[in-house]
Amino acid sequence: MQLPQYQPESPLDPLSDDELSALDDQLADLPGDGALNIEALDGYLCGLLLSPRPLAERPGADWLPLIWGSESAEADPFASGKQRKRLVLAVLRHLRALDHELHQNPQAWEPILSVAEDDEGEWVDALDWCAGFMLAVDLDAQAWAARFQDPEWAELLAPIALLGADEETLTEADRARLDDLSELDALSRSVPEAVLGMAAR
């Protein structure tokens, strides 16, 4: 199956809120449970854009199938080519908008995070977003390794790596931090600044 490569010079046509919601629904309606939700997709695309390897150099077949939970371009969960094309085009439009915001208009960029409200206020949860970001990191683990060893990069990546870590790799102390709602909220609120710091480097 041929999948398109990202073209940084493609027209800028950001998805509306309704279109983002429709994309989330499209992903949720796919068979199986491996597709990313809109929060994880947003984090994944940001991670790809901030990768040491330019995304435009990477074939679409390398990174697009992970969005719908497949290991390769041959594993296709779609009912039709039209359904696949509609989803891929929406992803590419969102990717192009994120690229523009992160690198040319950072004050306009906001990650898609889960927000809950209770009597005590608003709580932000970036677990899915960071899991998506770390999925992108895993695609280029060797290239990212040098950044994790750089003190300035490591500081920026720390909250994302913790929030997006595989639960099996967490220490008891890490699990306790993530189980604490106020700690989870504080870590999640630090994510946007960390991402913008990476984009500016």
Image (spheres, grey):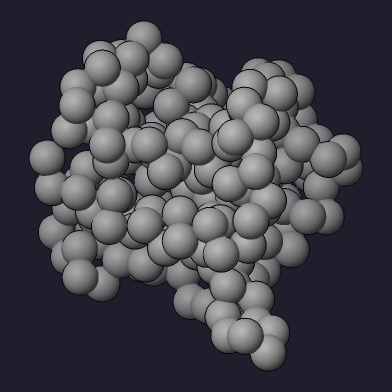
In front here: 1 or 105? 105
Look at the image and tell me whether residue 150 can be seen: yes
For residue 141, above or below residue 197:
above
Residue found at x 56% / y 64%: 182
User: Where on the picture, by quarter, is residue 151?
Assistant: top left
Image spot of residue 127 (x, y percent): 59, 50
User: Where on the picture, by quarter, is residue 56?
Assistant: top left
In front here: 199 or 98? 199
Q: How many marks?
A: 0
Q: Residue furthest right?
A: 31
Residue found at x 42% / y 43%: 159
Image spot of residue 177 (x, y percent): 58, 46
Quadrant that contains the N terminus: top right
Residue found at x 81% / y 47%: 30
Q: Residue 90 vs residue 50: left or right?
A: right
Q: Residue furthest bottom?
A: 119
For residue 55, above or below residue 123:
above
Quadrant that contains the C terminus: top left
Image spot of residue 44 (x, y percent): 49, 41
Q: Residue 149 vs residue 33: left or right?
A: left
Image spot of residue 111 (x, y percent): 42, 62
Residue found at x 64% / y 71%: 21
Look at the image and tell me whether residue 10 can be seen: no
Q: Residue 17 vs residue 27: left or right?
A: left
User: Where on the picture, by quarter, is residue 24?
Assistant: bottom right
In front here: 194 or 88? 194
